[in-house]
Amino acid sequence: MQYDDRVQELIAAVPGVAGWRLAALPETLSDTQVGQFLNSFGRDTASSLRDYAMARCLADLGLRAAEVVQIQLDDLNWREGTLQIHRTKSRRAYAVPLPEPTGRAIADYIRLARKATTTSRAVFVRHCAPVDVPLGTGRVHQAVHAAYVRCGWTDRSGTHLLRHSVARRLLQSGSSLKEVADILRHQSIDTTAIYTKIDLRSLEGVALPWPGSTS
């Protein structure tokens, strides 16, 4: 007996795979890996000093690539040690504390590499033709990807890995979910809730014993 397998006609009857919200586990870097990432940057040229300063903004503050390239000279308050973040997804302005290593990296770039004749008020500018033009987000992603490759992480990409790592570090240091949401500038704490999956210390405190175990 022969059967006529008309598979194409049955495809529409196959249900799609469910995609549950917040189902994925955020990938993060350990503190040791973050240190390896930052140490992979050379600081002997104008471009490498700039890329290192941008990397510190990503790894220390959890900034988005778009937020990094939009930093203006006037956003840096050296006296108070703060950085003003503008034009984020919420179109609001935020003043965030500027950690000493981050501030030092930015200051070194401005003092040693950024030309005094630059007319742009953007902190991070091009050093190849056309020079003194504000960077686009593509250059931030290129610098981060090149650092991943130098570290031997050829299977990793994107700047959000660093942002996730900031959230992990904050949670492990005892920060509340609301504090993490404020630092990462989330409009809703529901967006921050995904990081509860990587807060192993808190999860251990609420985990129930495995059925049949003695603990």
Image: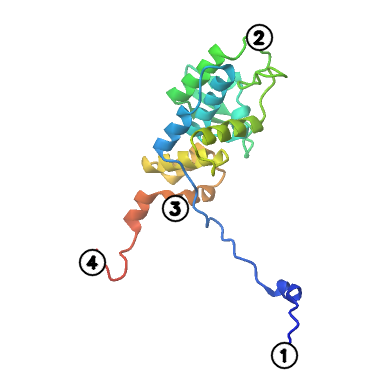
Q: Which mark is residue 117?
A: 2
Q: Report the quarter where the N terminus lies.
A: bottom right
Q: Is the C-beta separation of discs 1 and 2 under 8 Å?
A: no
In the displayed structure, 41 sits above or below 199; it is above
x and y percent of residue 37 in the render? Answer: 47, 33
Q: Which mark is residue 197?
A: 3
Image point (59%, 61%), residue name: 19
Q: Amino acid at mark 1?
A: Met
Q: Amino acid at mark 2?
A: Thr
Q: What residue sits right under mark 4 in the picture? A: 214
Chain-order first, disc 3 or disc 4: 3
Q: Nearest the camera: 96 or 46?
A: 46
Chain-order first, disc 4 or disc 1: 1
Residue situated furthest front in the rendering: 1
Chain-order first, disc 3 or disc 2: 2
Q: Amino acid at mark 4?
A: Thr
Horizontal side of 9 relative to 167 (left or right) equals right
Image point (54%, 39%), residue name: 185
Q: Amino acid at mark 3?
A: Lys
Q: Is the C-beta separation of discs 3 and 2 under 8 Å?
A: no
Q: What residue sits right under mark 1 in the picture? A: 1
Crowd class of label 2 (few under 14; some 14 to 19; many from 20; radius 10 Å): few
The secondary structure type at the circle numbered 2 is loop
